[in-house]
Amino acid sequence: MRAILFILGLVVLLLIGAMMLGLVSIDMVRPAAVQAPKFEADVGRVDVGTENRTVQVPTLDIQRADNTQAPQ
């Protein structure tokens, strides 16, 4: 029960945040008279794409320590 209330509260907070940032706009199109009110939601859009590029990556050169010294 607590998990459901937590998820519901999180969804409400995310919706309020999206409305404050202008990502979601809800307008009442038809007032509540005899029929139920009608709402239209204008939501933001995010486009994600990919792009091919050539990137120079630094190389790594590893030199092992020379442990062949004569014992003293």
Image (cartoon, rainbow, N blue to C red):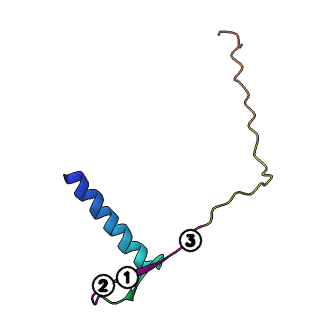
Q: Distance between the residues labelled 1 and 3?
A: 22 Å
Q: How crowded is mark 2: few (under 14 residues within 10 Å), some or many (20 or more)?
A: few
* Residue at (76, 40) in percent of width and height: 59
Residue 25's place in the image compared with 10, above or below, is: below
SS assignment at label 3: loop
Q: Mark 3 points at which residue?
A: 45
How much space separates mark 2 and mark 1, taking CA atoms? 9 Å
Quarter location, residue 11: bottom left
Badge 1: residue crowd in 10 Å (few <14, some 14–19, many ≥20): few
Q: Position of residue 64 (x, y in %)?
A: 71, 24
Give the magenta range. Answer: 33-46
Q: Mark 2 points at which residue?
A: 35
Q: Is residue 63 above or below residue 3?
A: above
In terms of depth relative to the viewer, which is nearer, 37 or 34? 34
Cβ–Cβ below 8 Å for labels 2 and 1?
A: yes
Across and down, in percent, residue 32 comes to 29, 88
Q: Does the magenta stretch include residue 43?
A: yes
Element under label 2?
loop
Q: Are marks 1 and 3 in contact (CB under 8 Å)?
A: no
Q: Mark 1 points at which residue?
A: 38
